[in-house]
Image (cartoon, rainbow, N blue to C red):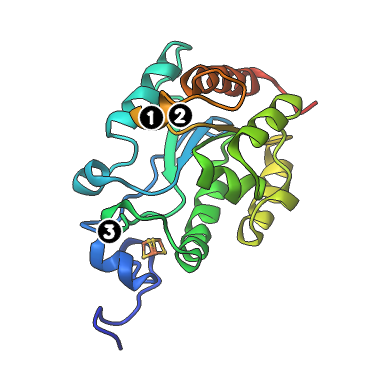
Amino acid sequence: MNNFGPKSTREHECRLCPELVASRTQIVFPTPCPPGGLLAIGEAPGMEEDDIGEGFVGRAGRTLDALLVQYGIERNRDYGVANIVRCRPKDNRKPYKHETDNCLLWLSIFLLRNRPKVLLLVGSMATEVFLGPGPLYWHIERSRKSPVLLAKDALPTLRHAIRLLHGMLDGVFAVPMPHTSGMAWNRRAPNGKVWREIGEEQVELAVECLKSSHVT
Ligand code: SF4
């Protein structure tokens, strides 16, 4: 036993990551999407999410909400949200690799329960977990050629779930986009555009994927 008590692997009292158990107020569970819907996936809960117990409720989450509402896509009805790790890291540090590995087990289960067709990967970390290493801008350009999510690109913990999803849904898409926080949103990307413009274009691509009936 450590200072944080016995490790529990049950979803509602998970204590697999001692540092995150110490820094969290509560576990922030994903919000489901309808089968075949869109799931936005970020890195980890921030302060507001940790307080309220719901993902994407801070300013950055509201920005994403507003972008999707323009296309008639509403949270809880048409799209859901999740994070790579469910517990808030202290001072918003990046999650460690073992924490990511631990929590991806939960995310795999969630993906299979909810069967999203489009994963909107918000920020570099979520993008690399599903699409492999590489700069965000490179992944964005690649997604414009083909947004089909390939299991081989994802971290090993996710591959089986992605293969099963492809079988269930006749294809799954992944669309990376920049983080919607004010700081990231207003910087310039390598092509000279502000990241906000690129983010808006990626949301449009995600909506096109959602409306398409099969993978091409
Ligand atoms: S981050 Fe995920 S795996 Fe780690 S303690 Fe929280 S719920 Fe459990």
Q: Quadrant of the C terminus?
A: top right
- Report x, y in % for residue 209: 65, 23
Is the Cβ of the residue at disc 1 closer than 8 Å to that at disc 2? yes
The picture places residue 17, in percent across and down from the top left corner, at 37, 70
Foreground pick, 93 / 12: 93
Q: Is mark 1 within 8 Å of ligand 1?
A: no
Amino acid, disc 2: Tyr
Ligand 1 falls in which quarter? bottom left
Side of 111 where 42 appears, left or right: left
The disc at residue 194 is none
Q: Position of residue 16 (x, y in %)?
A: 39, 71
According to the image, label 2 marks what residue?
79
**The one of 134 and 12 positioned closer to us in this rendering:** 134
The three-letter amino acid code for the residue at tag 3 is: Lys
Q: Is residue 91 above or below residue 198?
A: below
Q: Helix, strand, or loop for circle 1?
A: loop
**Residue under pointer 1:** 76
Q: Name above or below for residue 171 compared with residue 212.
A: below
Q: Regarding mark 3 in the picture, which secondary structure is present there? A: helix
- Horizontal side of 11 relative to 157 (left or right) equals left
- Residue 161 percent coordinates (x, y): 64, 53
Mark identifier at residue 90? 3
Q: Amino acid at mark 1?
A: Asn
Q: CA distance from mark 3 to mark 1?
A: 28 Å
Residue found 30% across the figure and 88% down from its top: 1
**Would you call the spot at circle 2 few (<14 residues within 10 Å), some (14-19), or many (20 or more)?**
many
Q: Residues within 10 Å of mark 1 (few under 14, many from 20)?
A: few
